[in-house]
Image (tube, rainbow, N blue to C red):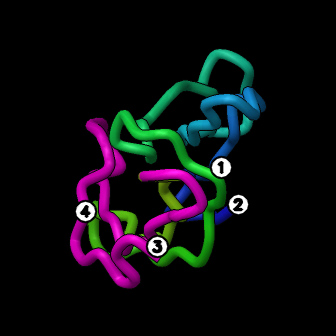
Amino acid sequence: MRKVNNTLYIAFSNGDVSGKSYSLWKSDGTEAGTVFSASLGGGHRTSGFGSYAFVGDNLFYSIVAGPTSPGSTDEELRKVNINGGSGQVVKDIFPGT
């Protein structure tokens, strides 16, 4: 959870262990003002959401994607524009580990 200006940003998991995915939501503190902002998994199954930081209109975050093959996962640095969109890989930190 992080407050930027007058908006609170929260990352949630869909809770489906067979294909877990994370979404970024934003809120102004009201029910009507709480809305989906962006998909963080980039369409891939994810098993963990890590550190994050806001830089301008972008959220940079680490995520564990996978498994890419039996017994392997990828840790990636991703970014997403907080005004909408889907997470994009900036750097595959530990490919295929």
**The residue under label 3 is which amino acid type?**
Glu
| Callout 1 touching callout 2 (CB < 8 Å) | yes
| Callout 2 touching callout 3 (CB < 8 Å) | no
**In terms of secondary structure, where does tag 2 sit?**
loop
Query: Tag 3: Cα neighbours inside 10 Å, few (<14), some, or many (≥20)?
Result: many
Q: Which residues are magenta?
A: 69-97
Residue with the mark numbered 3: 75
**The residue under label 4 is which amino acid type?**
Val
Rendered residue at 24%/55% (across/down): 88
Residue 28 location, quadrant: top right
Q: Which mark is in front, 1 or 4?
A: 4
Q: Nearer the viewer, residue 91 or 11?
A: 91
**Label placed on residue 10:** 1
Q: CA distance from mark 2 to mark 3?
A: 21 Å
**The residue under label 2 is which amino acid type?**
Met
Question: First in sequence: mark 2 or mark 3?
Answer: 2
Q: CA distance from mark 4 to mark 3?
A: 10 Å
Give above or below for 93 relative to 17.
below
**In terms of secondary structure, where does tag 3 sit?**
strand
Q: CA distance from mark 1 to mark 4?
A: 20 Å
Question: First in sequence: mark 4 or mark 3?
Answer: 3
| Callout 4 touching callout 3 (CB < 8 Å) | no
**Label placed on residue 1:** 2
Residue with the mark numbered 4: 89
Question: How far across and down, in percent of the image, does residue 53 sit?
Answer: 47, 77
Q: Which mark is in front, 2 or 4?
A: 4
